[in-house]
Amino acid sequence: MPQKHPSLYCVELRTAQWENCVRWYREALGLRVMVRVVEEGYALLAAGETRLSLISRRNSGQSSKRWSLGFEIDDLDGAIERLKRFGSKVSTPERDPEGFRAVVTYDPDGNTIRLFSWPEQA
């Protein structure tokens, strides 16, 4: 049997603001909570085929400019409105030469989040 390439199952984020981050990723970004264990400070959220794990840690470290999370979404304008209602800074939407529109925002810990959508096909 040929070996399958690994697939990315989960990205783990450690946060000192666990409740705020769970709420932000669920309500502002629209991810679905699959597992939430409040006593352990653990949440697993569905992000398409990949999962995002939020783990409560007192010493979670600083946000980093070395990486960002990128999400393909259907309704960029709707996402921008939700993010603004949560008080998130959102960049001005830009159209890439390849045709998609994209914005940059930041989660409650200051991690860079990129959102993009393709134009609807007729």
Image (cartoon, grey):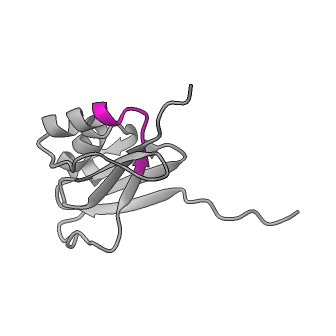
Q: Is residue 1 above or below residue 26?
A: below
Q: Position of residue 63 (x, y in %)?
A: 22, 69
Q: Quadrant of the N terminus?
A: bottom right
Q: Is residue 42 visible?
A: yes
Q: How many marks?
A: 0
Q: Position of residue 43 (x, y in %)?
A: 35, 48
Tell me the magenta residue range.
71-78
Pick out the residue farthest to the right: 1
* Residue shown at 55% from the left, 30% from the top: 121
Relative depth, front residue between 29 and 6: 29
Q: Position of residue 66 (x, y in %)?
A: 33, 74
* Residue shown at 46% from the left, 50% from the top: 51
Does the magenta run of residues contain 56?
no
Q: Quadrant of the C terminus?
A: top right
* Residue shown at 14% from the left, 34% from the top: 85
Relative depth, front residue between 74 and 2: 74
Does the magenta run of residues contain 74?
yes
